[in-house]
Every structure is written in C-alpha cells, then in structure tokens.
Amino acid sequence: MMHKTLSSLLLCTAFFCQAQSNDIRANQAPFALTLEQAMNWTAQSDFSSAKNISKQPLARRYGAQLDPSRANLDTHVKVLYAPDGMNNFANYLDTQATFNLYNFTHWSQIDVLNWFAGTADHVVQIPARPWVDTAHRNGVKVIGSIFLAIAKYGGSPDTAEALLKQDDQGRFIMAHRLVDIAQYYGFDGWLMNQETNLTAIKDAENELVEGQKDARRGAELGQKMLAFMQYLTAIAPQGMEIHWYDSMLENGEVRWQNQLNEKNQAFLQQGVSSADAMFMNYWWKKSMVERSVSLAQELGRSGYDLYFGADLWPSRNAQRAFSQTQWLEDLFDSDTKQGLTSIALFAPNFNFNFSGEPHTPVFSQFKNDSQDSLRFYQTEQRLFVGDDLNLANNDLDGWPGIGRYVPAKTTVNTLPFETHFNTGQGKKLIENGQQVLSGWTDMSKQDLLPTWQFAVYGNPSMTVAYDFEEVFSGGSSLAFTGSLSAQQTRIPLYQTHLVLGKNNTATLTLKGDVSALSLYVEDANGKRHMFALDAITPSASQQDWRSYEVSLSALAKQSITQLGVSFSEGSSEENVNMYLGQLAIH
C-alpha cells in the first residue's frame, strides 16, 4: 500500500512539474511567427517544433439526425468557428496546471476551426497540436491565420510587399512556405485576413500619415495580392482550404463589402479559383445574402463557399450574441429552410473573457473563477441549442440555437467505442482510479463527446451537464439531475454509424441510483431497443462507481444509429442525481 501511494505521489508530482513548465505562449514560436521567420521557416529552424506536429488523421463524418422532424435540415451548410485570440487562449503543447482555461466541446456542430489571431508583428498564426488532434478526431478541419493588420494599428504596405515576394521564376515564396508549414504540422489550411490598406503611407516610425495615400502602389500590390491568392489556392494540396476575408479590394484599399459583389468577387473567382471560401464581413441583410448567392452561382461557385460572418461579441451590435436573432433565419430560405450560405461564427469566446456591459451582463466568470464552470459550459451550449438549453424543444421566442438550423455530424463509426465524457480539463485528473493531478487542461485528452449537448425528451425537469466533482476517468462525468416524470425521459447522446457483431457488449459505469435507468440502442429502422440496468448485476469499480455490462448479441449484424439513456416513468417526488462516467461498446 505504501508503494502504491508513493508511486501515485511521484506520478502526480511529475505531471504537475510538466504542466507548470508549459504555460501558454501567446506570441511565440512555434505558434506565432513574424513574416521574416515565416519566410525562412524550415522544419529544422529554431522557430519550428516537432512537438506541434499532429499525426491525427481527419476522421470521416456522417450526418446526425436527432429525430424525424429534423430530416430536412440542410447538411451542406458549413459552420466556421473563430474564437478571437486563440494565441492568448490555447498556445500550449502539454498539460496545463490550470482548470479554468478556454475550452470547446461542440465539435459535432462545426466544420472548420479558424485559429483566429495575429498582431502587426506576428503575421503567421499556427494552430496548436492538442486542438488539431481533437478537431481531427471529430472530423473538423483547422485553419491557421495570416494577419495583415489595419494600418492605423501597425499594419504596413511594406509588410504586404514583403509577403508577396517572388523568386526568379515568378513563384510566390511565401505561398510555398505556408503550404509547407501546414503540411508539416498536419493542419488544414489558412485564412488570409488582409486588413492593411495598401494605399496607406507610413512615416519612419510606422505611424499612419493621415490624409495621404499612394493609389498607384496600392493598386499594384492589390493586383499582386490577387495573384498570390490564386497561386496559393492552386498549389495547395487536395483537402487543404484557403479562405479569404472580405476586406481588401483589387485597388488595394480596404473596403468591407459585407456581401459578394463586383468589387470583391475576384478574390473568390476570376477565371480560376482565388480562394476555396470567402469569410464575409458582418453588416449584411438577407437581400445582400441572396444577391451574393446568385453572383457566386454565376461565377460557377456555390453559395456554401460564402461564410457569412456573425460577430457575436456582446460589445458590438452586428449579430450580438443571443439578443440579435434575425440574422440566423436570414441565412436560410424562408420556405424550404434550406441554407443559402455557410456561417462564420466570430468571437464566440464571449463565454470566457467578456466582462459585461450595461446592456449585457457577464455570461461567466470562468476565466477568473474556476467555480463558475457550469455557466461557461452552458453559455456555449446555449449558442448551439437555444435559450432553453434543450435541443429537443423548439424555441419559439428568443435565441433558437445553431442546431435548430444546422444538423450535427458524428465520427462514431468504428468499434470499439469508449468515452468517459472527459472535456479535456478538470479540477482533478483521474487515471486508472488514481488522482494524478489537480486543476488541469489539455485539449488533446478530450474524449469524443455527445453528438447533442443536450436533448431531453419527455421531461422538462431533467437537466444534463458536465460535472467536475464526480469523476470516474479523466476530468469530468455526465450528470443527470432532476426528478422523474409521468412519461418516459429519453436523452439521446450519440449518433452512430456502426454494425454490431455477435459478441459486442455495452459498458456503462455510473454513480447513483439506476433503478429507473435504461440504455437504449436505436437501429437503422428507427426501433429503440431498451436495456434496463436494474436487471443487471453490476461489478464494483472504484469509489462507489458501478459498471454494468449489457450484451448486444441480439442485435448482431444490425446497423445502429443512436445511443442514449432513458428514465422510466415515475413520481415527480422521485429525484434523480446520477453520474455517467463511462459508455463503451466493445
């Protein structure tokens, strides 16, 4: 016993020391590069790191239909997620000794994560491997950022000119570097966020000379930037995505158009493709969306190549989170509810570092108070499932949630499957039944989380949330809290694309009273097969956790499409307080 305790202490100490020595590096290599560093980048350079290489392949995704009433949701709409300042939130490679760092769980509801970041000096922003690993396990692409700052805030036409340098054969040197960097680290492309007015004149101290401009130089650099984008898009290997932000025009001036029109269309398509997608600025209305789609189609492109931006930051008023709602409806056909374009969610990190305004109170204090994790997670949940935090309901008033319009996707398509509902952070880290670390964060440790977070049918009193006190393995479990209802409570967790064999078994590890609980497995015909846990003798696990083995042999050779749990009917006086620490099929 003494040896086991000593070993655990040594392991905990080792983890703690490692975590303490790897703090977030906001604007440092290998994550943030100056233009000079990027130009001279090689895998052997001092500002590259093999530790940042992701070897996780991009998982195949399948559509996830929550229930038959949502069968017509448009599966072609893509969602880009762009937290503002990923360099400040997530530039780490190893486990961090802090619970309350920025995190994300709704991978099933997005398609692209943009590592949105940059300064006037640090032009090239590279995603961190832990986030790329987890995104790829969920079938989500990750793209870095090239940021050319607004002239007033340090951006310079000189920087753009240096970026656009060509060799003796006319090849754009930086385009090849960007492809090399993405391929080396294993991420999926770039957003070109070019916001420098190339007609601007700067003095010797890089201060903007007001009232003057060099239109000729601006036009020359603008045309060269267009050629650069076409070159970069052409040499990018299959699967790598190049996005352009709606900012600069061909004459080099920055004039946000908020739509696709004759002034900026060349940066999407001009004979050849100039970008795989365009991130549209935020001040648009439905008529502008509809005109943009028509023009894209005239150019031989799809409306889904246009990611109409939604600036969610509460201090601004374009698509202010939860208070501005019409914009979401405007991106869909009024009659068919099919998508017109794709969606770019900008600054969704308001659940983490928004400090409040008179018109909008703070959503959570999680950044400064690790006890405020519930509000942090529920605010992200609200963004995707609506004001009532329940995707099973249709919010008729208020914020409806992205998931009302855009269906989720799943990567649960191979066996064995196992999750401990570990969000990649916690107040403690449990491994093999032992606590090896106190407060921690490491996105690379995140499990495949529920496809829907969360949907509860039949019982408005039941809530589902991540819990960081009761932990079986990792840093969190899934807590079910409420009371029984006069009708069955059903909670779908995972969309699956699995075929069972004759020896497959499901394992559920729980803490709490399971007398009303069943596992349900839905087959491809929509039939739900119920397995009551109170009919199964559990095996003891650890610290009051119990494991239940459910034979699935009766479903051999059948395709299963959904995994969930249900609670039987009961009295409203019967309280539920249960934790699910493991769900597996072996």
Image (cartoon, helix red, strand yellow):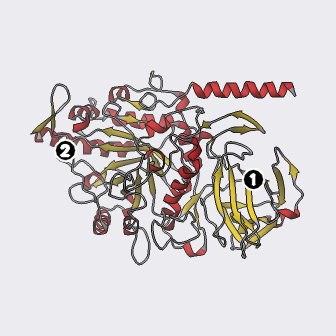
Task: In the rendered view, tell whether residue 28 sits above or below residue 175.
Answer: above
Q: Amino acid at mark 1?
A: Ala
Task: In the rendered view, tell whether residue 308 sits above or below residue 147.
Answer: below
Going 14% across and 38% down the picture, which residue do you hit? Answer: 217
Mark 2 and mark 1: Cα distance apart in space: 55 Å
Could you say where residue 471 lies in the image, as x and y percent from the top left? 72, 45
Look at the image and tell me in which quarter the N terminus lies: top right
Q: Nearer the viewer, residue 456 or 417?
A: 456
Going 29% across and 33% down the picture, which residue do you hit? Answer: 163
Q: Amino acid at mark 2?
A: Gly
Callout 2: helix, strand or loop?
Answer: loop
Crowd class of label 1 (few under 14; some 14 to 19; many from 20; radius 10 Å): some
Can see residue 57? Answer: no
Could you say where residue 421 lies in the image, as x and y percent from the top left? 67, 50
Q: Nearer the viewer, residue 499 or 519?
A: 519
Can see residue 522? Answer: yes
Task: In the rendered view, tell whether residue 478 sits above or below residue 237.
Answer: below
Q: Nearer the viewer, residue 218 or 449?
A: 449
Name the residue beneath numbered marker 1. Answer: 584
**Left or right placement of residue 157 versus residue 230 in this view:** left
Name the residue beneath numbered marker 2. Answer: 252
Residue most extreme to the top = 46
**Left or right placement of residue 81 versus residue 570 in this view:** left
**Left or right placement of residue 575 versus residue 252 in this view:** right
Going 45% across and 40% down the picture, which residue do you hit? Answer: 86
Could you say where residue 295 lies in the image, as x and y percent from the top left? 28, 64
Going 20% across and 43% down the picture, which residue do you hit? Answer: 222
Residue most extreme to the left = 212
